[in-house]
Image (cartoon, grey):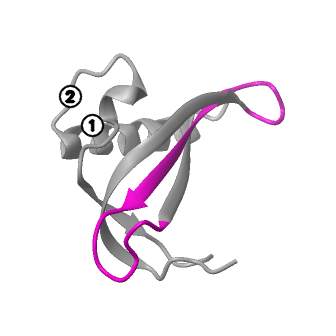
Amino acid sequence: INHLPPGKYLAHLIESEMQPTKAGDGQLLKLVFEVLEGPSARRKIFDQLNLVNRNEQTVEIAQRTLSAICHATGKVHVSDSAQLHLKPLIVTQKGEP
């Protein structure tokens, strides 16, 4: 797989979907961002936020990330992740662990 190099990208959210976790004991929000400019334009960045999980720290991290996305898009009160679609924001692509 040709991974996107680590860095910051101007992107927007093009897909979001709540799905059950593999273990079936939680839910995660799958996100797909599309890079808007530069040599990586139209490339995708994927993320998933464990919003319902037994591990409180995992949920806290997911909620912080979702809050940052909301603030970056200017949508502070969101009832559906679709309200965040197509709003430009800076996405940080981290290197592979």
Label 1 is placed on what type of residue? Cys
Picture coordinates of residue 32, whole percent (x, y) = 50, 49
Determine if the magenta segment contains residue 64. Answer: no
Q: Which residue is mark 2?
A: 76
Can you name the residue that lies furthest to the top here? Answer: 79
Vertical side of 20 occupied by 70: above or below: below
Label 2 is placed on what type of residue? Val
Vertical side of 10 occupied by 32: above or below: above
Q: CA distance from mark 2 to mark 1?
A: 5 Å
Ranked by sequence position, the earlier of labels 2 and 1 is: 1
Asked whether residue 29 appears in the rendered view, the answer is: yes
Seen at 67% across and 29% down, the residue is 19
Question: Between 20 and 38, which is closer to the camera in this rendering?
Answer: 38
On-image quarter of the C terminus: bottom right
Picture coordinates of residue 34, whole percent (x, y) = 41, 58
Using a 10 Å C-alpha cutoff, classify the residue at mark 1 as few (fewer than 14 neighbours), some (14 to 19) or many (20 or more): some
Q: Is residue 54 left or right of residue 68?
A: right
